[in-house]
Structures are given as structure tokens and as C-alpha cells.
Amino acid sequence: MRQIIIIGSGPAGFTAAIYAARANLKPLLIASSVEAGGELMNTTEVENFPGFPDGIQGPELMTKMQEQAERFGTEVVYDDVTALELTGATKTVTLGSGETHEALAVIFATGSAYRKLGLPDEERLSGRGVSWCATCDGFFFKEKTIAVIGGGDSAMEEATFLTRFASKVYVVHRKDTLRASKIMQERAFANPKIEFIWNSAVVGITGAEAVDGLRLRNTVTAEETSLPLGGVFVAIGNDPRTHLVHDQLDLTAEGTIAVAGRSSKTSQTGVFAAGDVIDPTYRQAVTAAASGTVAALDAEHYLASLPADLLADAGETELVTVNN
Amino acid sequence: MSARAVTDATFETEVINNQKTVLVDFWAEWCGPCRAVSPILDQIASENADKIDIVKLNVDDFPALAAKYQITSIPAMKVFQKGEVVKTVIGAKPKVALVADLAAYLA
């Protein structure tokens, strides 16, 4: 048995691991088999992470966080959690390989997943012109006319990035103002290849074998139009990834995991949550990292409060100290 | 064992005229999910070496083949039998999910 297992390998998971490892809790971090590193693995330049005045590539930032966590003794496993048992003093984590791991505390930092439009043809045309990842798929849309759906920072980043390849990028947004930060908006407005289509909801994706266009409905006039396109990038936000725990932990009305006050304490004793999975509002690499710190410190306090015989089972009792 | 790379020159022999079932992994260096799924494909290849050949095609180096097979999202894994595409799997997936998708060709 371990003292602590961390599930998730984005900024929240790795920062929790850095703190837990420095407190000698010898964390095991379950990173996922194909999504290790989390959302930043699919971004390009990160310009708002403090300490990198010239920016840093998302994947490089995640590699550095992992190195920092490993330097202090974090053990990283590239597998997916398939089941969790969070009730009781001992928590059990089952992996895709069939292996199970036990721990006295768990930090849940699984982040969020791309939100889908929920249109009937979206799934059928995914990989056939519908994409959620500009950095992965932009290359295939050279000299094409494409659209990005959404009005947030990630939509602006994708649209701007996609102008490297596409001849024309429409940004389709439901409202007439953007949620994106000023700097990202201005960059998109200044780009001659980007054109905004305001007040428009996507009501259909068309195409027999591959995407050939969108059906749009004007949110003010209710008029429907067709927009011929060679590809569609969906950037309408993310949903917290709670499917492993939704029947064991309390959730908020927004669907995130409920935590007590400013802490990371979930409704289950010994289970802590951090990062985008608890955050419906800010969802930044820095806020996720900070949240991972909170979870590691809360977990340390919790472990320090446990009876000595329980900790003896988890080994290293003398090292359970609050060390911040 | 790491999957063999195929090229414009070898695609015909290694994939189209291959008597065995072949999975072609369309990938690129800059694609994170491709790098993540690559070791999983290597495992599947070595565990099923008698049933399936798994090869890699770099879409940067061979854009004509990527275009021919209408690749717009990678990783794209296409299963070929007798020169025809019989199955397409798009996106990096955990081993369990990928094996389930490919079950018909690994039996």
C-alpha cells in the first residue's frame, strides 16, 4: 500500500506530485496511456506561464513538470484508471493493465475533455474534416477554407494557428462579443485570413464522405444559411472528466467535483481533487498548478492526522510531516 | 520491436500486395497523440506478429499517400486487406480500446 496516488498528469497532477514527493510521500502518479501530459500537450506556445518570458511550448512545459516531479521521487505509470474504490480508509485504483494499487489518500486531477457540439453528423464526420485539435490536424487543411467554432481563448488560438495552413478561417460564434482575452482577440482581428461570423449557432454539419459545410442559424433573426467549408474545428469548451467518480463523490451544479471551501477536500475523506476537474471558471495552467499544490498540502495534513498503525502499512511513517 | 516505416516506394509491396493483414499508422513527428500511441501499436504488433503487420507512414514525408487516403486527422490507423482499406481508427486510444477496435483482425 502507498500513502498517496495522484490520478492525472496535467499541471495540477504534476504540481501535486512535486509537493507530495518533496514531502517524501513517494507518490504514484497515473498519467494515462495516450493522454499523458494533459491538455497542454496539444497546444503550441504557452505565453502566460510565469517564469518563461519568451514563452514555452506546451509539451516542453509538461516534460519539465514531470522531470521536476520525478526528481523528488514521483513514480509515473503510463496507464489509464478503469475503476476506483474511494470509500473506506484504503482507496483502490484499478488500471487498464488489470493491476490494482492501494493508497491512504488519492488526489484526483483528471482535467476536462473537449466538449462536442452534439450534432448528429459530428461523430460520423470526425476525422473526416471535423477536428478538436488544430495542432494535430491543421496540417491537413492546407489552402482550404475552414471554420473554428467558439469564442474563447482556445478558439482564437486555434483560428490564428490554422491560418498557417488554411487559405481562409471563419470563426463562428453564437454571440456578438468574444469571451477570449483581449490579446488573443486582437491577434485574431488583425489576421487578414480570419473572418468572424457573429450571432450564429451551428445547427448541422454536412458532407457525405467528408465535411463540405455547416448549416448556421442566426441567433437574432433565426435565418438559416449554408457555409461551404473543407473542415471544422470545434473549440466550444471543455467538460470536467468525472465519469470515474460521479457515483462516489459529490458534484457541483456545473458538473465539477465539489470541494469544501478553498480546500481540495471532496465529499469522501482522504480524497482530494485539483485542477480543471474542480474549476468551472478559470481553467488555466497556473490555476491548475496552484490547485495541485493545495491538494498535496491537504493530503499531507490528512496523512499526518492518521493513526500510526495505518501509516505503518503504507510505509515511511516517520516521513509524514507537513513540510511547506 | 518498432514498427517499420513505409514510403512512397515501398507502399505497394509492403501494404497493397501484402498477403497478410496490414495496419498503416499515419503519423507525424509534431503530433503528440501519435507519439503516445506508437508504443502501444508496437506492443500490439509484437503480440500479434503472426496475424497482422503494423507499419508507419510519415505524412510529412509522404503527403501524396496521406492525401490519397484522405487523412485529415492523425493518428489515423487504417487496416488493409488485399489492398483495400477495411477499417479506420482515428485518434490515440488506450491499448484496451485499440485492441477492441481491431479485434476482428487480431483473432
Image: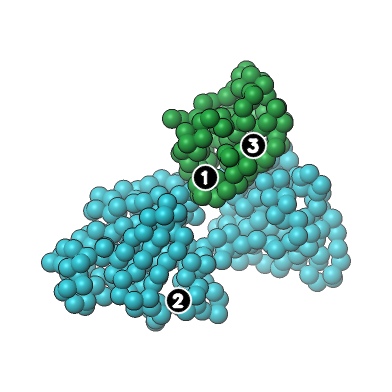
Chain colours: A cyan, B green
Residue A253 falls left or right of residue A323: right
Answer few, some or many: residues within 10 Å of disc 3's Cα (few below 14, many 20 plus, some between 14 and 19): many
Q: Earlier in the sequence, mark 3 or mark 1?
A: 1
> Where in the figure is residue A228, as x and y percent of width and height?
82, 49
Q: Chain of mark 1?
A: B
Q: Which residue is mark 1?
A: B33
Q: Residues within 10 Å of mark 1 (few under 14, many from 20)?
A: many
- Mark carried by residue A249: 2
Q: In the image, is A277 to the left or to the right of A148?
A: left
Q: Residue A101: name its quadrant.
A: bottom left
Could you tell whether A20 is left or right of A127 in the image? left
Residue A289 lies, in percent from the top left, at: 38, 62
CA neighbours of label 2 inside 10 A, class few (<14), some (14 to 19), many (20+): some
Label 3 residue SS: strand
Task: Specify whether residue A193 is in view.
Answer: no
The residues bearing labels 3 and 1 have C-alpha atoms spaced at a distance of 16 Å
What amino acid type is highlighted by mark number 3?
Lys
Identify which amino acid the numbered label 2 is placed on: Leu
Q: Would you say the residues marked 2 and 3 are in contact, meaning their CB atoms lie under 8 Å apart?
A: no
Residue at 52% from the left image edge and 67% from the top image edge:
A243
The amino acid type of the residue labelled 1 equals Pro
